[in-house]
Image: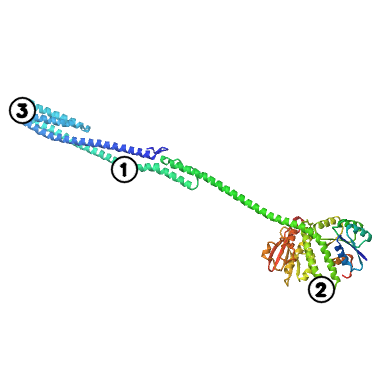
Amino acid sequence: MNLSNTKSSLKKSLIVGFMIQIVFIVGVIFALIAIVNESNKVVETQRDIMKVKETSVSLMMIANEQLLQPSVRAYQQWQVLMKNIRHQIELNQIPEMQTHNQSMLSQLNEIEMTMQRVHSEGLPETVLIAMRPTIASQIYNLLAISKQLLKTSENLHTKKQQTLFIFIGLLGLLVISMPLLVMFIIMKQVLNPIEALSESTEIIAQKNFQIPVPTSKLLELKPLVDSMNEMRLTLLNEMALKSDLVEEIEKTTQAQEKAQALLETLQTNQTKMIQMEKLSAVGSMVGGVAHELNNPLMGVHNYIEYSLSKISEPKPIEMLNRAQEELERVQHLVTNMLIFSRAKQGAKLNYFSVFDLVENVALLLIAEFKKYAITFTNATDQNLQIYSNSDVLKQVLVNLITNARDAVKKNPLAQISILSEMAPNNRVKITVEDNGTGIQDKDINRIFDPFYTTKPAGEGTGLGLSISKELLQQLSSDLELDGTSPSGSQFSFTLPLTANTH
Amino acid sequence: MYTVMTIDDERSIRDGFKLALEDFSELDVLEAENGLVGVELFKKHQPDLIFLDLKMPVMNGAEALKQIRALNPNVPIYIVTAFAKEFFEELQTLQNQGLEFEIASKPISLLQIKQITQAALNLHGGKA
């Protein structure tokens, strides 16, 4: 059986298996037939031996008769019997019985010789009588030998039958073992490769396409293994493609994210640049116009002021006062415009006291505080020196306090406070706080835009906060809205305490 | 008697100073429409207080300041200027050159002119 061969076909194996089985079975059947034949021979021999026995009895009776009254007829009868018995003995060819046959034949010869003497010499009756026991014993011997032969043949028969049974058992065993053999072949040839294949499919199912499906010992499975390997390679390629694709997608996504971030930065920068450009363009234009307006406006203001001091009629005084108020609004705008254009300049830095700065600003605005009954508090640290530009800060504080004034002026308990507190990085935080009306949500994102104002037409320029923010940025600081609510707002910025932290 | 000089190319500005100070009986007000005229008038009249504009034709305020300071280091000179970039820088330059001056920021009202003048010349009363 070709079980150990590297490659074999199940069909071939089964055919070979069947053939070997059939050869065995045929062999056993032949053996059986031979044994049955042998057995039959033994049975026939037994019959012959039985005849020998019977003939021996007849021989004894004739011998007895011859001895009593010899006659030719009896002698002839005797000779025929002898011939028969001899023939019967010679028929027995079974090797195991030949010794007995020989002794039987020699016994018969002795008997014959005795009988010839009796017949030919015409011995007296007394002698004949005396010979009777001799012949009788010789015939008894013959009988005994035939008995032994029978026994031997019976033994032989039993032996043959035992052999027969063994062979029948062998045949049965072969017949029964046939399905077992087939099962064994199938198991060895089919189940094992299928199990191996199954293992391979499990491996493939776990998405491990690297391990090849081992070549099967079973020829019939070869196409399956081949197509599985083909499938595995296809999957491997697709996996590779897929992972390439995934990588590609990841790369693309990353690139996209980067691009998005870049775009956002660009957009922010662009917005900033537009803002700056706007400010810059507006700045230079505004600056030029404001310059030209500043002097004539001041002249007109002073002419009116003079005229006011010279007349006494109430109506013209009121009208001139109104004219002056209007004019002051225009002057305020022009001043802011000039500051705005000045915001581009570099400011010189030095050490000065925050408290003093706030006091100076308060002096400038004291008339306003009185007019609207505003309580102004300078709550900054009196010992605090900062390193900055006082002119710029003055302008920032004026702008912030002016805005605060506009927010609180309808409040009967109007308050504006300037606070200082220490901030990280060796800086001080200045906060301008008011208890005014606050900034509305819709305006919060636009308060730092130039020319954006919520005040009635003519009352605000919309430049105050944008200028202040710009000025502070010039000082490496920034203006921030710390908080706002209907009960007040807080604007703050930080300033360095020393030159080296700037 | 004191003499105050206003040097400005704008008539309305000069008028402002004249009108503001006309109530002070002890003051004479001189007008100059540019730096050159101002320097000439300074040499002639030796004014006690000068209001000086920066941006002027013929001779600007900075040059006038230098020339007047060369003649008289002590006379109080107020540079009348708006908060504007170029002026701010110019003022810094002048300061760095060791030239002494005060600043009066534009716009300036008649009242402020009177107050500055009173303070500078140590005047009392007048009809302010």
Mark nearer the viewer, 2 or 3: 2
Which residue is drawn at the image coordinates 44% and 46% (left, top)? A198
Which residue is drawn at the image coordinates 78% and 71% (left, top)? A371
In the rendered structure, the residue with mark 2 lies on which chain?
Answer: A
Label 2 crowding class (10 Å Cα cut-off): few <14, some 14-19, many 20+? few
Label 1 crowding class (10 Å Cα cut-off): few <14, some 14-19, many 20+? few
Q: CA distance from mark 3 to mark 1?
A: 76 Å
Q: Position of A12 compared to A286: left or right?
A: left
Which residue is drawn at the image coordinates 70% and 56% (left, top)? A272
Please tell me which of labels 1 and 2 falls first in the chain. Answer: 1
Q: Position of A35 compared to A326: left or right?
A: left
The residue beneath circle 3 is A124
Q: Position of A60 compared to A501: left or right?
A: left
Q: CA distance from mark 1 to mark 2?
A: 143 Å
Q: Is residue A5 above or below residue A413?
A: above
Mark nearer the viewer, 1 or 2: 2
A459, A83: nearer the viewer: A459
The residue beneath circle 1 is A176
Q: Position of residue B99 (x, y in %)?
A: 87, 57
Kindly identify which numbered label has been placed on residue A315. 2
Secondary-structure class at tag 2: helix
Quadrant (top left, top right, bottom left, bottom right) of the N terminus of chain A:
top left
Q: Position of residue B5 (x, y in %)?
A: 90, 62
In the rendered structure, the residue with mark 1 lies on which chain?
Answer: A
> In the figure, residue A475 lies in which quadrant?
bottom right
Q: Residue furthest top?
A: A121
Label 3 crowding class (10 Å Cα cut-off): few <14, some 14-19, many 20+? few
Badge 2 amino acid: Lys
A222, B111: nearer the viewer: B111
